[in-house]
Image (cartoon, rainbow, N blue to C red):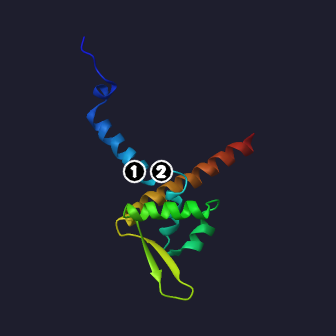
Amino acid sequence: MKNRTIDEKVPVDCKVHLRGINDTIDILGGKWKFMIIGCLTLGKKRYMDLQRMVEGIGSKMLSKELQELELNGLITRTVMVTKPITVEYELTPYAQTLKPIVDQISAWGIQHREKVIKEMTKK
C-alpha cells in the first residue's frame, strides 16, 4: 500500500476552499481587524473615533492593526493639515468588497444573539 499524506486525501476543491479561508484569516484574523473594518464600512474615521468605537482596544494595538491593514492595502491613512494634525482612515475601494461580508456576519451575529436570549428565557 502506498504511503499517503493527509494532504493527498483531501479533495482539490476542499484544498482550494480551505486555502482561501486560511488566506482571509491571515489578513483579517484576530480580535480587532474585522471590528476596525466594520467601523470603517460606515465611512471615514479618525484615530480617536476608532478607539472609542472598537470597545476594549488599546492605543498600541489599534496602531498596530491599522498599520497591518494599510500594509495589506485595505485602508488608507490621510494626514489632515489641521491644528492639531488629525489623521483619517478609510477603506480602500478593494476593501469595500468586504462590506457585504461584514453586513452578513453582523446580521448573523444579531440573529444568533436573539436566538440564544430567546432560548435562555424559555428555561
Labels 1 and 2 touching (C-beta < 8 A): yes
Q: Position of residue 108 (x, y in %)?
A: 53, 52
Q: Can you name the residue that lies furthest to the left here?
A: 2
Q: Amino acid at mark 2?
A: Gly
* Residue 54: % across, % down: 60, 63
Name the residue rendered at 59%, 49% in the picture: 112
Using the image, tell me which numbered label, if any, was put on residue 24.
1
Residue named by callout 2: 29
- What residue is drawn where x is 30% and y is 25%? 9
Q: Quadrant for residue 58, please give it.
A: bottom right
Label placed on residue 55: none
Where 12 falls versus 105 (above or below)?
A: above
Disc 2 is placed on an element classified as loop
- Position of the C terminus by quadrant: top right
Looking at the image, residue 65 sits to the left or right of residue 121; the answer is left
Disc 2 packing (10 Å; few <14; some 14–19; many ≥20):
few
Asked if residue 120 is positioned above or below residue 45 in the image, the reply reads above
* Rendering quarter of residue 47: bottom right
82 to 68, vertically: above or below? below
Q: Amino acid at mark 1?
A: Thr
Q: For numbered disc 1, what is the local secondary structure?
A: helix
Residue 85 visible in this rendered orientation of the protein: yes
Q: Position of residue 98 (x, y in %)?
A: 41, 60
Q: Is residue 99 visible?
A: no
Q: At x 55% / y 63%, what residue is drawn?
A: 62
- Along the polypeptide, which appears first: circle 1 or circle 2? 1
Q: How many marks?
A: 2
Q: Quadrant of the N terminus?
A: top left
Residue 94 in the figure: left or right of residue 78: left
Q: Position of residue 66 (x, y in %)?
A: 48, 64
**In the image, 2: left or right of 49?**
left
Residue 99 location, quadrant? bottom left
